[in-house]
Amino acid sequence: MATVRELRRKPIGGLTVEDMRLLIRQNVGLAYLLPLAAEVLRIDPLAEGDMYEGDLLAAVLTWSAEVWNKSPELERNVRLIVSEADVPPALKPEVEGFLAL
């Protein structure tokens, strides 16, 4: 929680992939962070924080239909990113779950 508290004080433009991954997993600032993460993923769909290749994508894909319904354009963009990405087998469950929404 201390890390999240520190990251909430950091300027959004200074967040790293790992910072975004952590905050998104903690449900912090999704309205701001999901679009920022989508921009990163557009350039590198398998952007990696400190966990594994594609960990940012995995964090983004875990959100419910309720979250995505609030941002249909963002959802379309993420669907496009996912459809064009060559995701590793470990990410297939997250991708399939997201595409099934």
Image (tube, rainbow, N blue to C red):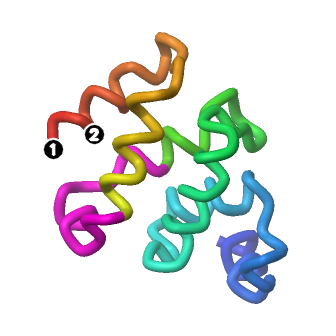
In the image: residue 53, left or right of residue 96:
right
Image quarter (top left, top right, bottom left or bottom right) of the C terminus? top left
Identify the magenta region.
Answer: 60-73
Which residue is denoted by mark 2 in the rendering? 98
- Residue at 72% x, 61% y: name it: 19
**Foreground of the two, 73 or 17:** 73
Q: Residues within 10 Å of mark 1 (few under 14, many from 20)?
A: few
In the image: residue 42, left or right of residue 16:
left
Q: Residue pushed farthest right? A: 14
Which residue is denoted by mark 1 in the rendering? 101
**Foreground of the two, 73 or 58:** 73
Q: Amino acid at mark 1?
A: Leu
Seen in the picture, residue 43 relative to 17 is either above or below; the reply is: above
x and y percent of residue 24 in the render? 52, 62
x and y percent of residue 56 in the render? 60, 45
Give the quarter of the image for residue 96. top left
